[in-house]
Structure formats: C-alpha cells, structure tokens
Amino acid sequence: MSGARWGLALFSLAALMPLPGHADTVVADLSSHSIAITTGFTGASVVLFGAADSGADVVAVVRGPERDVTIWRKAKVAGIWANADSVTFANIPSFYAVAASKPLAEMLSPAAAALYKIGTDNIKFEAKSATDDEQAKLFAKALVDVRKRDGVYSPTHQKIAFLGDKLFRTTFYFPANIPTGAYLVEVFLVRDKDVVGGQTTPLVVSKVGVDAAVFDFARRDGLAYGVIAVMMAVMAGWVASLPFRST
Amino acid sequence: MDVYLPVAEVSLDIFVLLGLGAGIGFLSGVFGVGGGFLLTPLLILIGVPAPVAVASSANQLVGASVSGVLAHWRRGHVDFKMGFTLLMGGLAGSVLGIWLFSLFSKLGQIELVISLCYVVLLGTLGGLMGVESVRAMLRRRRPGGPRRRLHRHTWMHGLPLKTRFRKSQLYISALLPIGLGFAVGVLSAVMGIGGGFLMVPAMIYTLGMPTSMVPGTSLLQIIFVAANVTMLQAYTNHTVDAVLALLLLVGGVIGAQFGTRFGTRLRGEQLRFLLAILVLAVAAKLARDLTLRPSDLFVIPSDNHL
C-alpha cells in the first residue's frame, strides 16, 4: 500500500468527517476489513487510521473470536514431567492486541481499563471448573504468557501515532498462526484518564481459495476426504516408483 | 518460501517439508520402516499441532510404503500371505488404538503417553538389536566361532492354526502374526506411526522370517494400517492435512527408491546395527525431554481449537 494513497485516504476522511460542536468523537477505519489466508500466507498487517478530537488520547483493542481454553501445569511425577493439573477458562479471546497513543498506565485509570477490558491484564478470566481464586489467577497469568510467546497476544502495547493533533494511525500485525473467525476492533477516546467515546469495527479472518476448499471438505465430509487423501498417497507412491522400474 | 497448511493452520517453509520427506523416505527404503517414529516428532518440533502431525504422517506413510513395496516386490521380496495375516490383526488393533488416542487426548495426557511409549519401546528394541547385530558382526569376523542354532523350539510353536508361509519358508501358527499385527496396530495408532520399527525386529526375532523378506512384507502391511488410521483420523478428528502429506510425499517417494537400492548393498547385521543406533538416539532424546525441567511449566494443548 503506497504512502500517497494513505495520505489521500486520511485527507478525505478528515474532510468528510462531521465535527459537531460538542467534543468526544472518534472516527476510525481499517485499511482492510478482511484478512484472506491463502497458500502463501505468512501473516498480514492491517492499518488502523482515524481522527479524534484534539487533545484526547486514543486506545485501540483487537480481539479475536472467543473460545474456551484449557491450560495445564506440569509437575514432576516419579521423575517425569507430566501434565498434572489444569484450569479451563470460558470465552477467552484467541487473539489480543492493544495500541495506544501513550503508555496505558499514564493515560487510563485502572478502573476504566478494567471496565473496557483494555490490556492483557484486564482480559476477563472465568474458570469453568471449580478452582480457588489464587490458582485461577496463577493459571490466567500463565495463559497470557503462553499466548504472548505464541505471538497471538501482543507482548506490549503498540504506539498510535498522531499526525497533527487530530489524525492518528497505527499498524496491527497478524502472524501466520492466527485463528480464523470474526474479530472486533474497538477504538476508545480517552480524556482525563477515562473513556469518553468509542467506535467498533469488524474484521474477518478467513481462509480463501484452495485452502478454504480443502479445510471445508475435511470438516464437512471427513470420510470422503479420508478416501481421497489415501488414494492421492497411493497414486503418488506408484508414480514415483515408475522411473525406477527398468532397473 | 513459506506455504500455508489449511488443516494444520500454520505456515511452514516448503523446502523444509520436502527435505524432511526425502530423508524419511530414504530411511523407509533402507530399513523397511515407515519412518513415522521420526516424522511425527519432527513435524511437532517445526510447529505442526500434534494431532495434525500424527494424522498427516499416517497419510504420507501410505504413499511412501506403496513406493517401497513396489521396489521390493520387483525383487520378489514380499510375502503377501504373511503380510495379509499380519494385517488382519493390525486393522483390529488400530481401531482400538484410535479409541485410546481420543481417550488420552480428553484426559490431557496424550503427549506424555506418546513419549513414554517411544522411550520404552525404542529403548528396549534398539538395545536388543544393537547387541545382537554387534554379536553377528563379530561372529562373521571369526568364522571358527560357535554357530547360532538355526531353529529353537518354544511354546509359540505349540499354538494351533498352523499355516505354511512358503515365501518365508515358515510353518507356524497364524495366531502369531495376527497377534503381532494387533499389538503393533494398537501402538501405531496411539503413537501415530506405521509401526514398522516394531514390526521389523519382531518379524526377524519372533517369527524367524528371512531378513531379505522383512522390509517389503512390513511395508505391505504398513500401507493398509496407515490407510486405516488416515481414514479414521479424517472421519473422527478432521486432523488429516492433505497438503502437508502431499508435500512430504513428493520428497518421500523419491527418497524411498534411493533408500531401497542403498539397503540392498548392506548386509543384514549392518542394516540392523544402523537401525539400532537411530532408534536409540531418538529414545535418548525423548527420555531427556521427559526428565529435564521444561522451560515453561504451563502448556495449552494444541487440540484446544479443534
């Protein structure tokens, strides 16, 4: 994507944006509302851009589809490291990234951050199995660490850069192992350490082309897929042995 | 150059996958083992989720084994009667194995079970084969030494259903190969492998088959056991990545042909000694991983998203 096109996009957005008399508005959009996972997919970048009232700060959160997650803790049993105990959490975002115009602690009160679930510390962890609070907390923290290492939770918040005092932009990076599904991008306007406005934009991550067809087939009709996979393997084995036949 | 695998949902370098396939195919041709016991752990190591690695390896073993069997068959080194007798037990065993696999997955212990199975079986077999092959090589150097008795009578020869296996020059109970096939079928489905590395020594030492007949016959039954595992995995767990399997195959089927030619130039005991070293190396690596403190005590099993 060329810089000139972005400049134009930002310019037209700024020009068209209705700026009513009262403050506390934020308008934002993504460079693309869908990420297509193709055969050559190695990750993707999506630009978030928009305009906010001057003097205010902006925080953006990207959240992947929510799923139940089980995390195990290993312990030494008879000299061997084995999965010993586990906690299952309900509805945990499969992807989480934050971008902010200032360090989070500096611009947002802990109460506001908790209310709007901004930052990996404020993801709501609800244990499905009966566990005491202390253990649930420990496992929740570990889950965030594992996800950060896998690259699906952003380790630190990214910088939102302001161009002038109204226009802002930032780039979110999505690694190759991102889960598919409906994502939500929330943009919050922050003033005096509190959220005063916001906007939500959808983002869809999906497989396209041959990959989508293969994946759908594998899910929809497992038996036929299995038959074809086996036949394909038999054919490949037979074809490969042909050049060696004469000897 | 990276390629996205649709079922595994990860991107991997296409040349790494092709090279991995070629290396495994070569071993498959030399030893008559499918190579799954190396392929599955290596796939997990490069980032393929464990359930997908297990199921896709089974798929690639089908093709690699077809290629290997054809090469051995042209030399007349396949005992079809023995192969299909083994297979009867093998198919029943793999159905039970797939059930156990999903049971241990639900309990969160499948990876531990797989590792323990590998360490115990590879360690025992590698050790036995290594000792035996070294003895055989020493005997060959000292021709005056005592010769091994050709045939030893044990309780196994008293079993009913005596059957003649002409190609292998054996007259033994059909229950022996059926039982062996069943045991290997269970373990191979749980461990996600064709089971050749168990089958080959068992055929040599327990059934007493001639070494030349073993690789081709073992590969013949691996074709069907691996095909059965592929179908069951595709049907019950949707974890077979055909794109991954095809890439591994392209390298693998060619590697297998070269491996077969290389293998015929080596003597039986040399072949067994090399396989023993390979098997022991994998066992040692897995044992070390089980006993060393892991870098991260917390794990999220990869089958969470399935």
Image (cartoon, coloured by chain):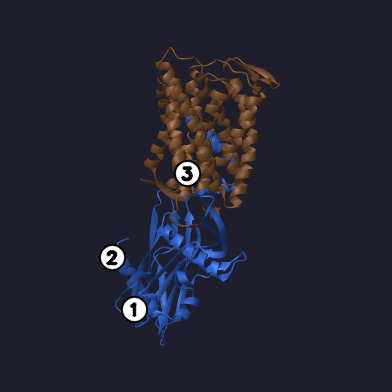
Chain colours: A blue, B brown
Nearest-to-viewer mark from 2 and 3: 3
Q: Which disc, if any, is residue A166?
A: 1
Q: Which residue is mark 3?
A: B287
Q: Amino acid at mark 2?
A: Ala
Disc 1 versus disc 3: distance between alpha carbons?
60 Å
Pointer 2 and pointer 3 on the same chain: no
- Label 1: few (<14), some or many (≥20) within 10 Å? some
Q: Residue at x 58, y 42 (%)?
A: B233
The amino acid type found where label 1 is placed reads Lys
Compared to residue B95, the image places residue A184 above or below, namely below
Q: Is residue B43 above or below residue A91?
A: above
Callout in the foreground (1, 2) = 1
Q: Is residue A242 visible?
A: no
Q: Nearer the viewer, mark 1 or mark 3?
A: 3
Q: Which label was assigned to residue B37?
A: none
Secondary structure of the residue carrying numbered label 1: loop
Tell me the SS state at disc 2: helix
Q: Position of residue B300 (x, y in %)?
A: 51, 56
On screen, residue B240 versus residue B87, left or right, reads left
